[in-house]
Image: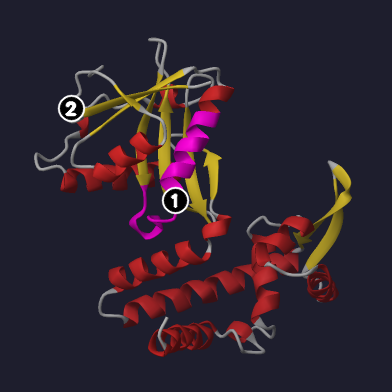
Amino acid sequence: MSLTDISRVRRFSRAVTTETGALDQSFLGRGRPLGVARVLNAIGHGRGDVADLRLYLGLDSGQLSRILRGLEEEGLITTETAEEDARRRVAVLTGKGSAEFAEYEALSNANANSLLSRHPDPDKLLEAMDFIASALTRDRITIELADPESPHANWCLDRYFDEVNRLFKQGFERAKTCDPQAPAMRPPVGAFLLALSDGLPIGCVALKGTDQGYAEVKRLWIAPSARGLGLSKRMMQETEREARRLGIGTLRLDTNEQMPAAIALYEKTGWARIERFNDDPYPTHFFEKKLT
């Protein structure tokens, strides 16, 4: 790494610190530094479990305890014993705390809108932000079961279909495919998995149940900003675990020759090529994997 590269990283850090007000003693003019505001924000977004809160924000126990005590003294939160486990504590916003959380949300949204509106190409700026955020939160990306008709699932699927339409020389018409229906992607016959980065979707994959002695893996997609992080392999591994949990012994999938990265992934992870098993007009390669 050259000194110029290091200087570029440090310039980026200074720019983000300044733009976000990280050094302000009164973040967004509300009388508290950024660290305290972040704790209040996390609690407001449902991360009230104190142990989870500490891990999420990367704070040590003593530092978090001081911040929580200060928020309690302001009358913004209360801490209670978790109903299901007396050893765990949960932070809950008071009415005053909820109002303060709403103020922070409104100001933060306004700041974000201002930043985007000042840039001549806000879409490119957002793409850069997504790329950096995915890289910085790589170790905290989670893979979770979701409903195939949820907003996050639809967001991913829309982008999957847009991408293959651009990629395939002949284009892509969803109506011509063996598109799985939502019930086939729900337990106990199937599943739908989302990759989430700090609550935002960055990938998906579906496990489509069938009555033919196998299930199909469908719609594997990773956001461009999160590619190269090994997420496709993680999602395929999680899909296999879910299939085993559902008692599925054989998986099949199809793909197109214009997706060489996907073909390489399947070949490297134990999938065997088989003959065509459907009449979908788009796939050119067909694979199967026996689960043990």
Q: What amino acid is found at the position of numbered circle 2 in the picture?
A: Lys
User: What's drawn in magenta, residue-wise?
Assistant: 222-241
Read off the residue under disc 1. Answer: 230
Can you give x and y, in whole percent of width and height, for residue 87 in the image?
89, 50
Q: What amino acid is found at the position of numbered circle 1 in the picture?
A: Gly
Q: Is residue 190 visible?
A: yes
Q: Is residue 230 located in the magenta-colored stretch of the structure?
A: yes
Q: CA distance from mark 1 to mark 2?
A: 31 Å
Identified at 34% across, 35% down, the residue is 267
Q: Nearer the viewer, residue 90 or 4?
A: 4
Badge 2 marks a residue whose secondary structure is helix
Identified at 48% across, 26% down, the residue is 186
Q: Is residue 182 located in the magenta-colored stretch of the structure?
A: no
From the viewer's perspective, is 226 left or right of 172? right
Q: Residue furthest right?
A: 86
Q: Residue furthest top?
A: 212
Is the image coloured rainbow, by chain, by secondary structure, or in one colour?
secondary structure
Circle 1/circle 2 CB separation < 8 Å? no
Whether residue 185 is situated above or below residue 22 in the rendered picture: above
Q: Nearer the viewer, residue 268 or 76?
A: 268
Classify mark 2: residues with Cα within 10 Å, few (<14), some (14-19) or many (20+).
few
Q: Is residue 99 visible?
A: no
Whether residue 165 is situated above or below residue 44 in the rendered picture: above
Identified at 33% across, 78% down, the residue is 117
Can you give x and y, in whole percent of width and height, for residue 28 in the image?
58, 83
Classify mark 1: residues with Cα within 10 Å, few (<14), some (14-19) or many (20+).
few
Q: Earlier in the sequence, mark 1 or mark 2?
A: 2
Read off the residue under disc 2. Answer: 176
